[in-house]
Amino acid sequence: QITLKESGPTLVKPTQTLTLTCTFSGFSLSTSGVGVGWIRQPPGKALEWLALIYWDDDKRYSPSLKNRLTITEDTSKNQVVLTMTNLDPVDTATYYCAHHYCTTTTCSYDSWGQGTLVTVSS
Amino acid sequence: QTVVTQEPSLTVSPGGTVTLTCASSTGAVTSGYYPNWFQQKPGQAPRALIYSTSNKHSWTPARFSGSLLGGKAALTLSGVQPGDEAEYYCLLYYGGAWVFGGGTKLTVL
């Protein structure tokens, strides 16, 4: 059974850096085709894809946010960390991590964490 | 800036059939966009329904199906139930990055 859980601060001040951790179980980030993605959702708004790290340490970012995002993995701890710099109130959102898996012909985001709400306010 | 467009809202009667679509500002959606569909109910995390156009997860009810229709990705719900009332999101792949649609609020009335 795949599970993921996001953790991090609930309140961050503008201009600060946000660090979120996704702790997962039920799969290995060393397995070919596997990845962990980050997605966020401002209150009452749509989902927004942020970043993805693959089993081979390949990393992908949203073009609109790539200058502010860094995604890393700690395979030994089964964790993926997302950092976002220069926070603004518009970054207030629920942040989700999700298990990503690709074969030669398919790709899916099948299992999601429960999400963690981050509020950016002074 | 790539934009993925969904119907903002749709209404369907219980037992009816409804099709939600997902269009790309770059042109026709093909299987190479690996369309994924998610259902989200208030206060809950999204739940995956369909991946890579038409593949169902083991938990996806049979009444949900995915396809390509007229240059768009499509999600069809047949025999709609009141519990299907939710927000539905599509997700498309753009050669490295992924982009969500704005979501469709489905009302069962």
Image: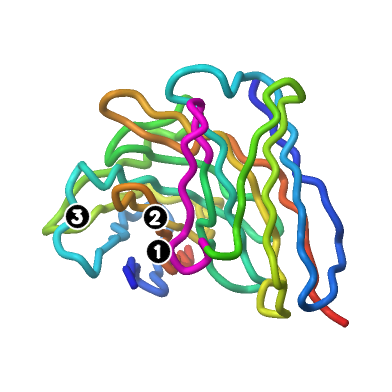
Number of marks in the image? 3
Looking at the rendered structure, the secondary structure element under dot 3 is: loop
Task: Pinpoint residue B90: horizontal percent, then vertical percent.
Answer: 39, 55
Residue topped by disc 1? B101
Colouring used for the render: rainbow
User: Which residue shows up at 37% across the image and 34% down it?
Assistant: A107
Give whichever of discs 3 and 2 has the lower sequence position.
3
Kind of residue indicated by mark 1: Gly
Residue topped by disc 2? B90
Q: Residues within 10 Å of mark 1 (few under 14, many from 20)?
A: many
Image quadrant containing the N terminus of chain B: bottom left
Q: Which corner quadrant of the image does residue B19 belong to?
A: bottom left
The foreground one among A57 and A13 is A57
Task: Pinpoint residue A37: horizontal percent, then vertical percent.
Answer: 55, 43
Q: Are marks 3 and 1 in contact (CB under 8 Å)?
A: no
Kind of residue indicated by mark 2: Cys
Looking at the rendered structure, the secondary structure element under dot 2 is: strand
